Image (tube, grey):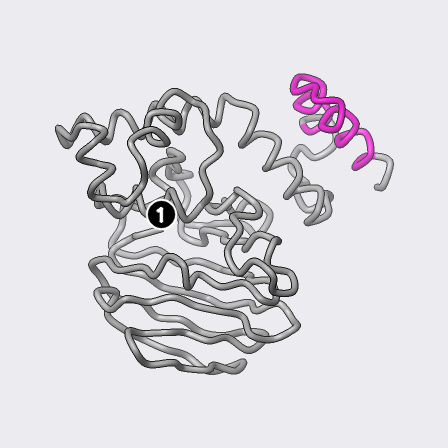
Amino acid sequence: MKKSRDRVLDGLEEGNREKTLRSLDRYTDGFGDRLSLDAQARLEMFFYQNGPTMAALGAQLRSLRKTRELTLEQLAARSGVSAGLLSQVERGQGNPSFNTLVQVAHALSVPVASLFRTEATGSPVVRRAERRRIDIHAGDGLGAGAPGAAEPTVTELLTPSLAGALEVLMIEVPPGYSTEATPFTHEGEEFGLILEGRHEVHLADAVYTLEPGDSITYSSRLPHWYRNPGDEPVRSLWVITPPTF
């Protein structure tokens, strides 16, 4: 098994996309769980930063902006993201953090995952090994200085598509991670269930500390952000309507 992973990562570390793709097809076809979480994260980062993913992201962003008849300057004013960075992303350049994409998506009134052209599978079933990750960009710098804050959250989509009335997410948050710098405010309602760890959810001026088995429901119109104050990862299940992420 380790030999399979090593061969896949050889191409990745050599910066050879074609070799990585061939190895991935050969050694993980139908067995995505053969790769360790670390290997999956490194592969996802590779594809994210080395096109065509960035080019596709840029094209999708440009299409959404033009459909809404917005200039770069208007979208910048709505999202709080500079027109220069937006222009870079549309051209398949730059290196936007996930939270930057959240701001842009909310300004366009679309789910964040729609920027990555997340499409339906055609089946109502989502197998564990086939879950699609939404926040594939590691290390957006939130919670700098806190233990583990440089690590990415892992957000997996448990619903087959974003075309329905709700989306269900499985989220793993590393110790010390916080979204305090970018509170979310959008239309809809959210429900969260903590599976592992201790989680803080901030709603406007209120703070709720949740333990395993605890759940929370709130209007997404309230400014909300979260923090993992502990030294263990937090795993939680979230239901959001309408689809936002």
Residue under circle 1?
102
Q: Is residue 34 above or below residue 46?
A: below
**12 sits to left or right of 96:** right
Q: Position of residue 107 (x, y in %)?
A: 23, 44
Residue at image x 53%, y 32%? Answer: 48
Above or below for 240 versus 119: below
Report the side of 188 relative to 128 (left or right). Answer: left
Counting from the top left corner in percent of width and height, residue 36 is at 73, 47
Magenta-span inclusion, residue 18: yes
Q: Where is residue 123 shown, x and y percent of the image?
A: 41, 43
Kind of residue at disc 1: Val
Question: Residue sitting at 56 percent across and 24 percent down?
Answer: 50
Asked whether 202 falls inside the magenta stretch, the response is no
Location of residue 54 in the rendering, given as x and y in whole percent from the top left corner: 46, 26
Quadrant assignment for the N terminus: top right
Displayed quadrant of residue 239: bottom left
Rendered image quadrant of residue 68: top left
Q: Is residue 143 left or right of residue 10?
A: left
Range of magenta residues: 4-24
Secondary structure at numbered mark 1: helix
Dominant secondary structure (helix, strand or loop) of the stretch shown in magenta: helix
Q: Give the residue drawn at x 46%, y 66%.
A: 237
Q: Quadrant of residue 13?
A: top right
